[in-house]
Image (cartoon, helix red, strand yellow):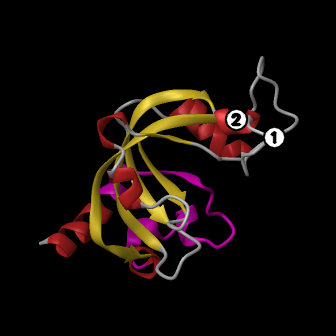
Amino acid sequence: MKYWLLKTEPAEFSRVDLMQCGEVGEPWTGVRNYQARNFMRDGMSVGDGVLIYHSSCKQVGVAGLAQICGSAVADETQFDENSAYYDAKSDIAKPRWVAVQVKGISAFSRVIPLTEIKELPVFRDSPLSKKGQRLSVIPITEEQWNSVLVLANRLMG
């Protein structure tokens, strides 16, 4: 099992939205960075753990837990001319972009702020702690995952 952090803007798709998708989950679309795409395509497997991270909002940080529930497939938004994620150069026969299926596990009662996460020693050298390196998909270690779970348990306990 691997662990990941997926960024989303809560005004577009929040932890609450993800929780409402049920067991089927939701395709994680709109990723338009090659390194992030490669993580999704080559690194993610069904059952992997996911931290849902809210960005571009008042309270930036980890907002909940999710799980990969479907392998990478072509991201359909790349072919939709009405989508903000449309890519005119993408070919149906050889798609550029992928999406994985993600289902919500739990939404935290409050967002764990990035400032708290950066204080954890296990995140000292993480791309999450470094401005300009926060891709929309970031691999995290089991130790980082467990550290966030400890913070989340304090929230809910």
Marks 2 and 1, how far apart at CA: 9 Å
Residue occupied by mark 2: 97
Residue at 40% in and 67% down: 62
Residue found farthest to the left:
157
Q: Would you say the residues marked 2 and 1 are in contact, meaning their CB atoms lie under 8 Å apart?
A: yes
Residue occupied by mark 1: 87
Residue at 54% in and 52% down: 138
Residue range of the region highlighted in magenta in the rendering: 119-146
Residue 130 point in image, percent of width and height:
61, 71
Dot 2 falls on a residue whose secondary structure is loop
Residue at 41% in and 73% down: 117
Q: Nearer the viewer, residue 123 or 137?
A: 137
**Residue 75 picture quarter:** top right
131 to the left or right of 26: right
Residue 14 point in image, percent of width and height:
45, 61
128 to the left or right of 49: right
Which is more foreground, mark 2 or mark 1? Answer: 1
Dot 1 falls on a residue whose secondary structure is loop
Kind of residue indicated by mark 1? Asp
- Crowding at dot 2, Cα within 10 Å, few <14 / some 14-19 / many 20+, comes out as many
